[in-house]
Amino acid sequence: MNDTIAAISTKLGVGAISIIRVSGSKSIEIVNSIFKGKDLTKVDSHTINYGYINNGVEDLDEVLVSVMRSPKTFTRENIVEINCHGGISTTLSILDLIVEKGARLAEPGEFTKRAFLNGRIDLTQAESVMDLIESKTDQSRKLALSSLEGSLKKYIQTFRNKLKHLLANIEVNIDYPEYYDIEEVTKEELKETIKILKEDLTNLIKKSEERQILKNGIKTIIIGRPNVGKSSILNNLLKEEKAIVTDIEGTTRDIVEGSIMFDGIELSLIDTAGIRETDNLAEKIGVEKSLSLINEANLIITVLNGSEELTENDLFILSQVEDKNPVIVLNKNDLPLRINKNKLKFKHIVSTNTNTLDGLTPLKEEIKKMFKLEEISEDDYTYLANNRQLTLAKKSLQSLKDAEESFENNAPIDIVEVDLKEVFELLGNITGENYNDELLDELFANFCVGK
């Protein structure tokens, strides 16, 4: 933390501009030693300065240099950003020169890590930085930005403050057991507050799990026996000929993938090999792979040929998905229906075709209902954004339930206090009030180097 780090913050390659970021106590001094222009040690903070980067022999590039002095910077250290012309040779030459003058190459995510360690952001905001960079939809961008602005941080701070107040009252009760009125007030407040906190945290966890699709999208597989129209449905949704469509059974022998933006959510589509008994080794491997994907998908679209009666293959496929809440698609509804819907014991059944412009509209509408996509456009974007946060929240909820159970069983109040302190600590782990170096190394290892 006492040294100065440097990295390329833009994608390395041919482009109009590259940005090289330098952070640390010597950042201004180091860049000033290679800059031809104003004396950067004397310019005002948060200014942009025109000049050249020179290696002592020649000018390397014409640049704009931003100087930002601590503590009003992302890392709360002195930061200098060099805007040079985009190009691999130019960018790397300037970075090498900065390292030669005393900086070291930053590790992945080290700028954000320093922002956290210096108290500029908490751990939820640090994680949201990478979420914002990786956002593919407007909804996931809003979710990440909300966390970056501190919505989850504020929620947890408020939650912990209520716990802190409750724990303080319990301590008074423990320290002064002779005062009966204090004990009664504490027990009444304890009962009501635990109930409210439990309901509040339960709602947050439920909402967060439902809204994970904002960030991760909906992993969707399309399964069915050969020639029921799986590949046509994929092509129609993607609006391109991604999968080969023929009348020959077994044409699709491996998975075919594609993605679309669907009501602001990414739908990752996988067209699988037609499931049937086969002696062809390549097709057999494809069928096995298709079946293995069933447990990995968020959405299973099971396609049947509505113009034919159910076959043994159809029945086998339906048995594989009966507990997975699939959408059953009776395809080819432009032909007479031969399948009895009443015999299909599934919640989501639609009829479609790929021959008309709106043939897949029923399928799209059913997906909207299943994932409550119309409700996701609400203004409240306070969510637990990843598995780490969700796991800690669920452990906190369990400790709250344990505290409530202890209270109802008339356990000593100091036993209840143990569970409440556990909740307080676990929620602190979410924001980074409590952390260890191993956790930080793991979290920031997934960041890009210049962030």
Image: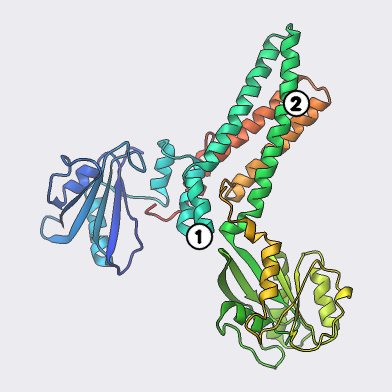
Residue at point 89%, 74% (across, down): 343
Q: Regarding mark 2 in the picture, which secondary structure is present there?
A: helix
Residue 336 location, quadrant: bottom right
Q: Is residue 142 visible?
A: yes
Q: Is residue 200 above or below residue 233?
A: above
Coordinates of residue 437 in the picture (x, y in percent): 49, 40
Of pointers 1 and 2, the one earlier in the residue sequence: 1
Q: Amino acid at mark 1?
A: Asp
State the image coordinates of residue 389 (x, y, percent, origin top left): 60, 45
Seen as rendered, the residue at the extreme left is: 57
Q: Residue at x 66, y 92 (%)?
A: 246
Q: Going by the image, does 434 lie left or right of 233?
A: left
Is 120 above or below relative to 7?
above
Three-letter amino acid code at the position of disc 2: Lys
Q: Which residue is mark 2?
A: 191
The structure residue drawn at horizontal position 59% and vertical position 75%, both measured from the top left corner, is 257
View extreme (bottom): residue:
247
Q: CA distance from mark 1 to mark 2?
A: 41 Å
In the picture of the structure, the residue carrying the numbered disc 1 is 138
**Residue density around tag 1, few if under 14, some if 14–19, many if 20 or more, within 10 Å:** few
Left or right for 295, reference 62: right
Q: Nearer the viewer, residue 264 or 374?
A: 374
Residue 297 appears in the rendering:
no
The x and y percentages for residue 75 are 36, 42
Q: Is residue 215 above or below residue 45?
A: below
Q: Relative to 375, does residue 199 appear above or below in the rendering?
A: above
